[in-house]
Image: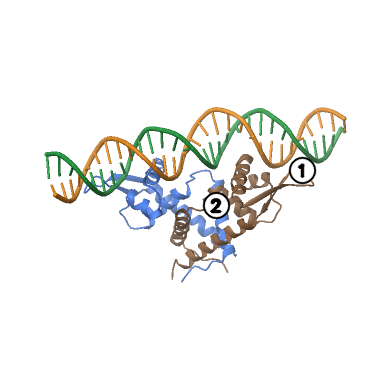
Chain colours: A brown, B blue, C orange, D green
Amino acid sequence: MSVRLRPIQALRLWQEVGLSMVRRNAVDLTQRQMVILLTIYLEPPPHTVRGLAAKLGVTKPVITRALDAMGELDLVSRRRDPADRRNVIIQRTVRGSLFLDEFSDRVVEAAVALAP
Amino acid sequence: MSVRLRPIQALRLWQEVGLSMVRRNAVDLTQRQMVILLTIYLEPPPHTVRGLAAKLGVTKPVITRALDAMGELDLVSRRRDPADRRNVIIQRTVRGSLFLDEFSDRVVEAAVALAP
DNA sequence: CCCGATCGTTTCACATCCGTATCATCTTTC
DNA sequence: GAAAGATGATACGGATGTGAAACGATCGGG
């Protein structure tokens, strides 16, 4: 079953969710950071810097800095790949999972409220 | 009829749309700018700087600068209120409408692709 | 071995955004 | 009319993101 969503509803959904994120000043991620975080949590591991850079079509420093920022917030963690120590494996954290759970709940709520 | 969307689908939707916006380097707005733009286009006019600032829970300079940036891109326009010349009325533009039309289409596409 | 290739990080100069405080302009009140 | 209030814009200092280029660490083929 596909998700039926009309253009005007899509805009309202984005506005509502964006509004709730702007108002809660808690964790404000860049759009790029958000996409990186979602990719890490939605797609099968392992995740590497170059892999994410290729997927998003950005340079590697963008990924490194985004991981720095989100690591500081404990939303992701990094460790060296023991097999090939050049690689860095990006891993999920409890806090990151919780953050995305809450975020998705907010989206679902906003979606339900679109046409009560 | 409400829009049925499960948490995991919400996350995938956000990832897909965000990904397409990161890849297309065309117009990249801040989350706040996007919310401001959506509010201008979705809610009934007139829109003022202080009204938007209050709605978003941010300071007025944030709105002024966002309008500067989006005005430069011709996504919104400003004019003085002739009735009370202290006010600035924020207006829609053709380009802004087109931009949001395309954006909403992308969201709808991504939503349909969630569960084919 | 060792030298080139790969990977993630760092450096640099630049741009943008933020909040606070202040400003110029306009309106309202007395 | 003059003073007080309201409105949007601007100046400033600090924080953060960006792209390009260079760097150090590690791997692997000859």
**Alpha-carbon span between mark 1 and mark 2:** 31 Å
A77 to the left or right of B21: right
Residues at circles 1 and 2 in contact by the CB criterion of under 8 Å? no
The chain ID associated with circle 1 is A
A26 to the left or right of A56: left
Position of residue B71 measured from the top left corner of the image (x, y, whole percent): 38, 43
Circle 2 crowding by C-alpha within 10 Å: few under 14, some 14–19, many from 20? many
Q: Is residue A81 visible?
A: yes
Labels in figure, total: 2
The chain ID associated with circle 2 is B
Position of residue A61 measured from the top left corner of the image (x, y, whole percent): 62, 39
Circle 1 crowding by C-alpha within 10 Å: few under 14, some 14–19, many from 20? few
Q: Is residue A104 above or below residue D4?
A: below
Q: Is residue B111 above or below residue A77?
A: below
Residue position for label 2: B18
Which of the pair D12/A100 is nearer the observer? D12
Position of residue B70 measured from the top left corner of the image (x, y, whole percent): 41, 44
In this view, the mark in front (1 or 2): 1
Q: Secondary structure at mark 2?
A: helix
Q: Which mark is residue B7?
A: none
Figure quadrant of residue C18: top left
Q: Is residue D24 above or below residue B75?
A: above
B61 to the left or right of A31: left
Position of residue B61 measured from the top left corner of the image (x, y, whole percent): 38, 44
Residue at 55% across / 61% down in the picture?
Answer: A102
Q: Quadrant of the C terminus of chain B?
A: bottom right
Residue at 47% across / 64% down in the picture?
Answer: A110
Q: What amino acid type should be assigned to the residue bearing mark 1?
A: Arg
Q: What amino acid type should be assigned to the residue bearing mark 2?
A: Gly
Q: Which mark is residue A85?
A: 1
